[in-house]
Image: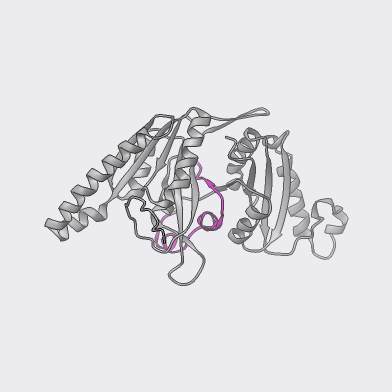
Amino acid sequence: MSSFRNILFPTDFTSHARSALKYAAAFAREGRGRVVLFSVQTGAVPANLMTLPERVLQQDEKNWLLELQTEVKGLLADPLLQGLEVEPVIVEGEPAHEIARAVRDYGIDLVTVVTHGRRGLARALWGSTAEEIIAEAPCPVLTIRPPQHDFVEHRGAETEIRLNRILLATNFRPSSIAATHLARELAAASGAEMHATYVIGDYFEQISVMFPEGGRSALSRMRGEVRDRMQEFAGEGESRVITHVAEGRPYAEIVRLAAETDADLIVIGTSVHASLFGGAPALGSEIERVVRNAPCPVLCVPSGRVVTPLPAFARSQPVPQT
């Protein structure tokens, strides 16, 4: 697990956010690293907050700072963090942006966040803070959505990562490369059984209905190409990979397979796209739905920004030399 040493644990000090603490502590302990306890506030926070005496914070209507100081001290005393290097950082600003900045400033390898599984029209139109963090963070983000399958056990002062099965969702695009390498590395380090899935999107079936002759032929070629590529993929690397090819809605098939295989972790590459309305960058809807519905934590691995949200399947081509 040496890939992750410096872990960023963003928190609003609620019990819900605290669900990610054991993952942050476990990975930091495994990698002999540290946890950066990170809080974003709407008001200015003095740099020396943690050393200010209570009598100072009780003056000039600064009770909220006293409450914040108390919450940080309480979290620092959590048994999960016993024996670990922990650095509290409190800033003012917008959460996703400040977290992305902190990843760069503090050399962060992994961010742990808790997300909600809410549904509905409003939920579909406006992404959660967790999804904004995934979109902006330049490092892997581990999302946890309690209650779901855990792969970290904490007993007394001991925290243990137990990865038995890892599911990699791939589409063989450049956006999957970093996720593939990380999934293989985690599987090798933990001795976990690795599964890989490619989902042929249901839009191919729709095309074959609209254009029977050309659509069915394209779908048949697609199936054959996917089978060949997955067979090649299974033979690559040093460890055995169990492959799965599915057809349908990508997020639904990934979630279904994770449940069927009793996966401890889903690893997926994330491509970030510009907002249609010129706002903050956004994830693809299929990735958002995997995060919201997964039966286990999801490790989102960034691959850089792309210019089109359309799914594709193509072998990499050599770059022409001049």
Q: Identify the coloring.
A: one colour
Q: Is residue 21 visible?
A: yes
Q: Residue 188: horizontal and vertical position, in percent? A: 49, 31
Please tell me which residue is depicted at 38% across the width and 53% down the height of the picture. 318
Query: Magenta span has 137?
Result: yes
In this view, the residue in front, 240 or 259, is: 240
Q: Find the residue positioned furthest to the bottom.
A: 277
Q: Residue 299: horizontal and vertical position, in percent? A: 49, 44
Q: Residue 271: horizontal and vertical position, in percent? A: 45, 56
In this view, the residue in front, 317 or 305, is: 317
In this view, the residue in front, 253 or 59, is: 253
Q: Is residue 201 left or right of residue 76?
A: left
Please tell me which residue is depicted at 52% across the width and 33% down the height of the picture. 151
Please tell me which residue is depicted at 16% across the width and 52% down the height of the picture. 217
The residue stretch that appears in magenta = 119-146
Please tell me which residue is depicted at 46% across the width and 63% down the height of the picture. 126
Quadrant placement of the C terminus: bottom left
